[in-house]
Amino acid sequence: MEARMTKRLQKDLEAMQKNYKDQFIVTLPNNDLKLWHVEFTAAQGTIFQGEKFKLQFKFSPEYPIESPEVIFIGKIPDHEHIYSNGFICLSILYDEWSAALTVSSVCLSILSMLSSATKKGRPFNDAEFCKRSQGRGPKAFLWSYDDEKC
């Protein structure tokens, strides 16, 4: 299982560095293939235009069968589907994950989600959820999606 994960992650990393080098900057803290940081700048013409953000990807040995854990770190976008602790309410990260998805497709989906926002603001239950989620990762929760944008 671990060999499949390593091979797939190397393929995903090569694709990101070749096809998206102008859009996403990938770093591997401690040269650990199972932990990625992906930096990007929000698209021009959006409410987040010019703002810089960083995603953290954690991969389990079951990747790509199992989704990575993906959160924002550092500056957290003020978005209706992103909690102030960095957790992202996006169905493809949880119950709509497919092994056909790649790191680049996840990054592009998150960039698209940010680009489609018409106003800044947190989820309605941000404070309560962040308090409840202390010490837990986003995959520890059963997510519900109130609209088709997440």
Image (cartoon, rainbow, N blue to C red):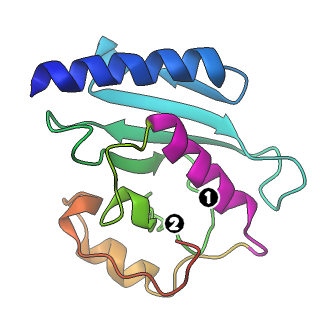
- In the image, is residue 86 above or below residue 35? below
Q: Is residue 87 visible?
A: no
The residue at 22%/47% (across/down) is 66
- In the image, is residue 128 above or below residue 100? below
- In the image, is residue 98 above or below residue 2? below
The kind of residue tagged 1 is Pro
Q: Quadrant of the N terminus?
A: top left
The dominant secondary structure in magenta is: helix
Is 90 situated left or right of 97 in this image? Answer: right
Q: Earlier in the sequence, mark 2 or mark 1?
A: 1
Q: Position of residue 149 (x, y in %)?
A: 59, 74
Is 44 situated left or right of 122 in this image? Answer: right
Residue at far right of view: 45
The kind of residue tagged 2 is Ile
**Nearer the observer, 107 or 75:** 107
Residue of label 1:
77
**Nearer the observer, 12 or 37:** 12
Q: Is residue 48 visible?
A: yes
Q: Which mark is residue 82?
A: 2
Question: What's the magenta region?
Answer: 103-119
- In the image, is residue 102 above or below residue 144? above
The residue at 84%/58% (across/down) is 46
Query: Which class describes the residues within 10 Å of circle 2: few (<14), some (14-19), or many (20+)?
Result: many
| Distance in Å between CA atoms under marks 2 and 1 | 7 Å
Residue contact at pointers 2 and 1, CB within 8 angstroms: yes
Q: Which mark is residue 61?
A: none
